[in-house]
Structures are given as structure tokens and as C-alpha cells.
Amino acid sequence: MRWELPSSSLDFFGSVKFYSPMSHSNAPELHPQIVDPFHNVTYRPGKLLGKGGFAYVYEFHDVNSDSSYACKITPRSALQKKKYYDKFVTEVTIHRGLVHPNICRVLNVFKDQMNYYIILEKCNGGTLTDLIRRRKHLTETEARFFSKRILNALWYLHDLYIIHRDIKTSNIFLMEDFDVKVGDFGLAVKCETPEELHWTMCGTPNFLPSEVIYSHIMKRKASGRGPDPNLDEDCVNLCHQLLPAYSGQGHSFSADMWSFGCLVFSMIYGRPPFEAADIKTTYKRIVRCDFSFPGSISVSEDLKNFIKGLLTPDPRKRFTVKECLDHSWLNPSKYFIPESLPPRIISEPYEVPPLCSASPTRNMQMTINMAKNAGGTDGRFIAATPQAIGGTEHIPTPGTANFYKPQNAILTTKSAAGASRASTAMAMQNVGSAQGVVNKYGINEAEYPQIDPPCYIMSWVDYSNRYGFAYQISNGSIGVIFNDESAAILSPNALIVDYSPSLLDAAFDRALFEEGTTILSEKKFKLLSFFRDYLENRSIVPIPAADRPKEDEELKRVIEQERMNNQEIDFKRLTKGLPLPQLFLKKWKLYDDGTLCLLFNTKVFQVNFADHSKVVVAHRSVTFMSEKREIYTYPSEYLKDDRFSFKELRRRVDRARKYYEIIKAARPVDSLAQYRYNKDSTKKSASGSSTRQLGQGGE
């Protein structure tokens, strides 16, 4: 089943969205085939699915598998201003790290000379806006189905300290079976703490909370500027009169809850609650909280109470995600909540009578009977008894859910682990009496808490057919093993370079990077600079400067100070904070099946498997990175505990140990032996082609 409506990407009833750097008339230039060189995938662009202020969305087909995706394309020309580029980087950084059944998944990110490409799972059911436009309005039963899944996504986001800031019907995408996928993270922001506040006025006017408006007014006033032209003097006065003072001090997670309240209202009544003829009037209605429930549609008092709890002007009194999920309107003991919806709801309502509350046993039997009578096309139902809650539901609720805690593979060691611990702590606090957070591999995080992952190689490129093997470490360092078995390592902020003429001796010299030719040949210095630019830019989201260690900056300041004092510089003496040598790759080996083995000078061992999963075995820890970039790091001693049932981690570690026995006995030159053998052999062949692909790389 597949259905589509025009204007599927337009904002609800003509509402406008802030931050629109690009005209819709400037569609991106697309070739007949788009190649992602780093993942070796070729796409064929299809029809235009939608467009917005920041990007265009096209249907993309994988020419090899014929799989269909949605591709969000942003022309490079639209991101020439730093603020637009930074905003784009923030969107990608946040979105690509999210793994949840109710969030649209980022599958791949790459770029070429003209555009940036974000490959997304394709939602063939259109958007919630499409469905509402076709049906005019939805029933309470349908609204409960969608609301519960949106709340599950919001729970997950808020648990990770992420505010979406643009929750609305056109950003709720639907699969063919009407499963929900929250998308468009163009305005999302990640907070460092739960108390963090933000001031930017962004979002869609019809779904904008009052504190976003008031905070914008107060911030502009503090800087001596006037507010947005659509916020006239009457609106400013209303804010001062009707809203609590702290509402003008920034917005937080509660902003998403207000927008969600507007979304629920829109599902039931077919329009946003504060919609008016112009934006100025809309803003005033929002500040006054001026909305009503039309009498033309009969609804339950529970629904009215639910919406009122969300559309509360005071953000501190507004319903949270947990309060929404605990509300009687979403109580399966009182109302039927279907697990899925049938195709016929495109054109006709799906109604289920409210359950009687007199007999739980009779209610449960009623549910079972209705499910049997409905058959496969009408969907399945959640059993009505409290004991069954969470046991048979298609999407688990936070009280009983298995929490996903993804860690983006580009995060540095401290930020990745810190986010994991903060996420776990917040989830535990919200769950209350639950036994603990259980990840998708069945590990109870309360019983087996994670620790900081070690530094690991996050991207690499193999140019050993000409120059050598280059890599980037998760702390920001760039290293190269040249074909003559020499090695260079550039510090995280590209200020200090260490060089060894032979990895067999591993004796390193040090210099400021700007003076690198004092210890490297000019050719190797140029190659190191080339690989630095290549590896820094090949990833769509570079490691933020704030997340890189600062020891090399401090060391450079000391060196410059000693030079000012006419002191002789002894780099071997000046190693405090930045040991000589820095962390570097000692050996590497790439197998024919794509498996890559990496051994650091600290004896930390990393294996990148052919399926893009990774394992890092350190002295006191083991780290598993799934093909979806989720990071799990545990103390090695857990492997001695039979109750630690992370089977995938154990399996990968066992395989890594076998590879380690091979590489630890090898000399550095053995890492290149296979290629050199192939090179010598192919010289004798007529074709003269190398068996190793030029410029092969990965993350």
C-alpha cells in the first residue's frame, strides 16, 4: 500500500518556519548518478519529495540493491555563511546519533563538490499533515495511537538532553503501516545539563510556545534592539502582564510539550489551536493562551484535560512526557489503543468504543474478541488489564522499555561516555522503581555500568600503493605510516608533530607543525598536510574544537614563551601533558574481506570488521561499536562474569584476540607485505593492475 498527497512537506496550513537561508527556486544541481565514494554506493536520484528553507528532499535509489531512500540535499552554496554551516553541522551531529523505532533514521551522510547528502529511511505513508488534510480530522482512538509513539520519541530525545524545537504535524512522518517516525532535526539543540536554557526564537508560529516568544522579547530588549516585527507593542505588553517572569529567561524541554499539545489539538480538530488570519494575531493568542474546544466535534473530558495540561503558559506547570504517558487519556485500562492501524483510515475513521471499567476481566475478553473479529487488516490491540501493559504493546513505554543509548562514533572519549552516563542517570531517575535500564543487547546498565571508551581510530585511508596508511584518532590526532616504515603523528589541534624515521626503533623527534620540515622531508610534510585535510574533511561532521584535548595548545604557549626569553628549546624536556611520542598506530593489516586490524603503541588493539562494526580491546576495558555507530564500553573484568550476557561483544572480542596473536608477532613491515607481494606479482602480468584499491578508506 502506498499513498501520497501533494505538498507533503509544507508547513501546516501555510505556517512559516524561521531560518530560511535558501530560496526554493535554487534547486540543487544533480547528476544522473550520485556516488558516495567512501561507502562505495551509487544512487540514482528520483522525484522531488519535498523542500524547505534549508534543503531539498529527493527519492534516491541504490543502483545495486534498488533500495529506495529519502535524501536530504543541501547545496554547498547555501552554507557559505558560517552560521548556516554551523547549524547544518549541529543537525547532522544530533540526528545521525539517534537510534529509536519512532525517529526517522539517518543511514548515511556524504558530500561531493556541489552538495551535502543525508540518506534517510523513506517513509512511504507521507506525513501526519497529509492524513489530516485528507480526513479533515482524526478520531481520539487514532490520535492516541499517534500520540503514544510521538511521546516515546520525545522521551528518548529528552533523556539525551535534546530539544527538538519543531514538533508539528508535517514533521511526523508515517510508514506504510502508519508507524510513526519523528523527523527534521534542523532546529534541534543538545543541552549539557537538564537546566540549560535557550533563547533563539525558532520553530513554526502555530506551534510556538509562549516562553519562546517572551524570551525573544527580553533578549532583544537587553541588547537594545526591538523584537521581531510580528511581535507588536500589544503582544509585548501582554507578555509582561500575563506570563511569569522566568518565562522570559529562555526555553527548555517543556517547549516541545507545548508544540505536542498543539499537534494533538490539530489531529482532533483539523487545525492548530491558535491559528489566526495573520501571524501577529497568532502570537497574541498564544500569549493569552486563547483557544477553545469547538462544539462541532464531541470529545472526552480526558482529552480536554490532556490538551489543557500541555497548553499551559507556565512551562514549570506544563505536562512532562512521563505525566502524559501516565494520563488517563492514554490509559489502556480505560481506552482501546491499537497497536497498528489499517489502510482504510486514509479515507474513513477508525473507531473503537470506550471500554467499560466495571470488570477488568470482561474488558480483557472484550479486547481479545474484538481483535479476533477485526482480523489482520484492522490491527492488533493492547490488552486492557494493567498486568498486560508493556507486555503486548508494539512500542514499549518508558516504564518498561528497553532504552537505546546510542553514542555517535564521532564523539570524543569523554563526551561520548559522559553523555551515556548522563542519559542513564536521567532514565533511572524517571523510571523510579524500575529494576534498571536494559539496553538492546539485554544488559542491565545499573548492574553493569559503562565506562569511558579509550581513544580509537575513527577514520582511515589506505594509500599504501603510493604513499602509506593515514588515520584519525578520536581525540583529533592525525597519523601516517609511510611506505618506508617511518611514521608521523600530528597533535589534536594540529600544533605539534612527532616523527620517527623507523617504526622498528620508534625513536621520535618533535617540532611545531609550522616548522615540521625541520624533522620531516618536504614531501612527507606535504603528505601529512594532505592527509590531515583529507581526513578532517571526509567526515561530514568534524570533531568539534571544544572536544579536543588542549595539551598541545599549552605546550605551544610554553615553547613560544621560552623563545621570547631566548631560552634553548628542548622538545624532549617539554613533554608535560603531551608525552613524546604521542599515541600512534604501530601496526596495521587489511584483509581481503575488508577486516582491518590496528595496533597502537600502547598495545590497545582495534578490529574493524567487514560489517562496519568495531571492537577495541584495551588494558582494562572492552568497547563494542555496532554498525549503527552505537558505542558500548565495559570493564574487562565483566567478561569473567557469566551473568554478563553481551553475546555479541564476547563473540567479537574472541575474534579480535585471534587477530591480535597474528599482528603482535609481526614486524611493522609485515603490515605492507601482502600489498608488496601483490605489487611484485602484478608487475609480471599483462594488465599491470594492483589488487589493492587506490584510496580505500573507511570509518
Image: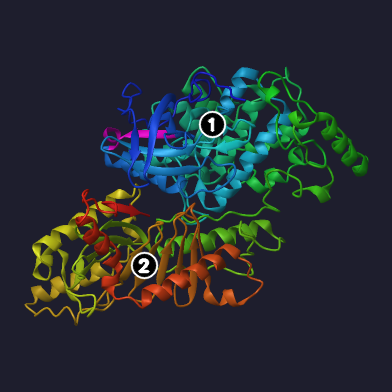
- Image quadrant containing the C terminus: bottom left
Left or right of 235, for residue 298 = right
Q: Residue at x 74, y 49 (%)?
A: 390
Residue 227 in view of the camera: no
| Residue 130 locus on image (x, y percent) | 57, 23
**Marker disc for residue 207:** 1
Asked whether 29 or 270 is in front, the reply is 29
Classify residue 482 by image quadrant: bottom left
The residue to which callout 2 is attached is 598
**Label 2 CA crowd tier, 10 Å (few <14, some 14–19, many 20+):** many
Q: At numbered mark 1, what does the secondary structure look like: helix, strand or loop? A: helix
Q: Residues within 10 Å of mark 1 (few under 14, many from 20)?
A: many
Q: Residue furthest left?
A: 566
- Asked if residue 220 is positioned above or below residue 343 in the image, the reply reads below
Bounds of the magenta span?
71-79
Give the quarter of the image for residue 362: top right
Q: Quadrant of the N terminus?
A: top right
- What amino acid does circle 2 point to? Leu
Place of residue 442 in the rendered image (x, y in percent of width and height, measured from the top left): 64, 61
422 or 693, nearer to the observer:
693
Mark nearer the viewer, 2 or 1: 2
